[in-house]
Image (tube, rainbow, N blue to C red):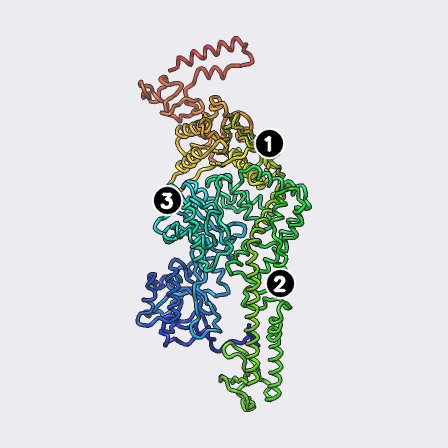
Amino acid sequence: MRLPLDPDDTPSEPAPAERDAAASLFAPAAATPSATGTAAASLASGTAGAPLAAGTAATPPAAGTAATSSTAGTAATPMFRQYQTAKSQHQDAILMFRMGDFFEMFFEDAIAAAKILDLTLTSRGKGTAAEAPMCGVPVHAVEGYIAKLVRSGRRVAICDQTEDPRNVKGIVPREVVRVISPGTVTDPGLLEARAANYVAASLVSGTSAGLALADLSTGEFLAWDGDLARAKEILAGYGPREILHVEEQPLPSDLLGDLAGRALLSPRPSWTFAELSARKTLLVHFGLATLDGFGMNGRPLATSAAGALIAFLQDTQKTPLGHIESLKLLDAASCLVLDQTTRRNLEIVRSLNEDGSRATLVGVLDLTRTSMGGRLLRDWLLRPLVDRPAIEARHAAVAELLEDRARRERLREILDPVPDLERLLARVSLGTAGPRDLVAVRRALDAFPLLREKTASAASARLREAGEGLAQLGELASLIARAIGDDPPLSARDGGVIRGGYDPDVDRWRAAHGGARATIADLEAREKKRSGIASLKVRYNRVFGYYIEVSRANLAAVPQDYIRKQTLVNAERFVTPELKDFEETLLKAETELTTRELALFEEVLAKTAAESAAMRRSARALAEIDVLAGFAEAAERHGYVRPTLVDDPVLRITGGRHPVVERLSGADRFIPNDLALDAAVEQLVILTGPNMGGKSTYLRQTALIVLMAQAGSFVPAERAEIGIADRIFCRVGASDNLAGGQSTFLVEMSETANILHAATHRSLVLLDEIGRGTSTFDGLSIAWAVAEWLHESPACRPRALFATHYHELTELALLFPRIRNYHISAREYRDTVLFLRRVEPGPADRSYGIQVARLAGLPREVLARAREVLANLERNEFGRDGMPSLARGRITSPGGTPAGAGGVDQLPLFVPASEAPRDPVLDEIQELDPDSLTPLEALGLIARWRKTIRRTP
């Protein structure tokens, strides 16, 4: 906070901190070269190398050998020993080493960072034994560079100066103050505001696994143990960005699923996962004598994973984790289960086409006003409830806010300016919060009494309880308002943090410091008058402080009490006793002011941290109000209705719509449809119809309506009666898993197998085109057997929709009592097809594949030939072996070659329709006029045709 008098003042030589930063990193201490004033100074023998050309970067030394190779023949400097110690402790991270105004990176770290950050890679000591690749970034812009490194999946260790260089003689102390990785970021610029940021720990033992998950940015901490298959679902559901595991035990690929290649895998020492060590870590962290209160008794795998995760966070954050106050044991039975395939196919938070969040359920429903509400909404949609009273409590709150528009709009107005209190509190607890964070906390606290007032009279118990959950922290809000200015600097060390009038000492030292410019101007005027030198200037730089500069031409007029300080080419610099006294007074004022402001800021910060538990609970309550108000807003905007929940396994929807498709296509263009499923009467629907007719949309909208209802939202329908589901399975679409070496059909069969093993009588199963990834006969047989299993298995029998192009499956409705046929209607008009998109009873008569192919632009010749082949196939003349199935034994091929058993000739399968053999029965039928036949004549014809057909081999 020193006050230079002229904006162009620059130091003629570096201050002690700058000399430290500029010193050769690897040169002997006695031979440290003079500085240049920049942080990018020579690393070896004072020689500054030019930027390396592409492909010429020196090969970095192997980990652990840098010190030896870089200091061959010379003693390591104290600074290099600092670097060596920090790097040896963080071999798996890019080490950013603070040198003056820059964070520098060396050796392999510099090569990797230069590529990721698009920096110029330089080399220090080029051509010497101490040659070292190097690059750096300025301190004031480091957060942006850290963000880029973390997004690329790298871990970053920050080695910072731990003391003010102005107060240190010799080498400035440095140590790693924080390790940042994809799972441990807390800075707003590195986080997605409306999505949680989890780091996980996993311990696998045989077919069982223990998991722990933490969001360091909010303090959420979860644990679970169970079978390996369920562990995969939990990991996929939370989507951690980083996963810890025992370093000698790589995670199974079937546990990672889609997270493989997306989450950073971090090996940790096996002892951190040992149950006794992990338990001790947890007990010490929470200050408890037992973990029974968290339900961890008898759960060794969950305990081991949770303890290892806490140890990792303590190691990387270098500070107590005060905001992680409790451990929640996940209860799989408390939520509707959505496996990885279902979440992907339903496009809840991510579009299959990766065209942004707008084409997702979250994109439609997220009308929340705060980041906390946005994150809670995602959690509710990915983990809907199965407890009917809890769901209906949410529905009641939404209903009240939908009806009372004035209350809803006022609540959303109050919520609009509220900052992300959860993440602010994490930074407060971790000690990384700045003055602006405290101002933001105050703004959040200011909203609490207003929200309590608007919810106090609510008829909904859920809404009232959320309002009552907002802590009364008016005194803390008042303290922050009185102590911290409205627009403080980013860092408390920059000064100007404490509001005037809050502390007498701050006011006194600030006044003394603030009068410096006037004092200097007065002193300069007096010295000009006393010496008679009109060009005399009082100046400042960081090396000498304040001085009087006199041009060489006026040296004869310099008063006797001037003390020479420095000689320049065209001038000389002096100090006077009065100027020295002023500088000492100013420096004291500056030091005292900075010290006092820092102390007061830390005091307010500590008082804020002391209330963090109450504020964290309040933040959750505030987020719930936000989500409920957002649900009500969505219901009004989009025309949603309150669903009726029942315990029976039924699903009756009138006028159901797809919440996302109707927004993208226009609500007036979307065709609503009904659905009736009842495990006792209509358990399984076989749905047929044309491609592009809307079968997949119908399946997905059914799943989304159930999901939305159990999350607490109203649903897109005219009426909905929903039997609560324990799981939703949505197997729609096909894709390869190339990385896993799995074909489309294998992926399809794996997902189907998971459904058949895991579904219960309370589940909802939606299957689209099972069996299409293989031959027609194999696929048809598998699809048939799957449908039978869903209907007949005593342990399964879920409500199910089964969309298919295998029209043979419609015969299942004739064989099984709880299977029904429905179809998506379409009409053929002038060689094209009109999609009516209505779901109607009965099977479809055809799939209109050729008409759809015409819409896709296939050549006319291909379409014509396809019609010929289709005509042959539809005559049902050929069996699986290619033999004629109706005329077997009486058709010869054009060449007269016998075909099939018994020397029967075979016609080629794809013979043109014009050359196909004529069937006398069909010919006679085509020539008949049904209107001219009497009933007796019709019966006679049928009898004769039956005899003809029976005589056919």
Q: Secondary structure at mark 2?
A: loop
Q: Residue furthest right?
A: 406
Q: CA distance from mark 2 to mark 1?
A: 54 Å
Observer-nearest of 921 and 265? 265
Q: Secondary structure at mark 3?
A: strand
| Residue 634 placement (x, y as % from top left) | 61, 43
Q: Which residue is mark 2?
A: 486
User: What quarter of the picture does the N terminus occupy?
Assistant: bottom right
Amino acid type, mark 1: Thr
Amino acid type, mark 3: Ser
Image quadrant where residue 504 sits: bottom right
**Residue 654 image label:** 1
| Residue 543 placement (x, y as % from top left) | 49, 77
Q: Answer left or right for 698 relative to 406.
A: left
Image quadrant where residue 506 sits: bottom right
Observer-nearest of 455 and 300? 300
Q: CA distance from mark 1 to mark 3?
A: 48 Å
Image depth: mark 3 or mark 2 in front: 3
Q: Could you tell which of marks 3 and 2 lies nearer the N-terminus? A: 3
**Residue 205 image label:** 3
Amino acid type, mark 2: Asp
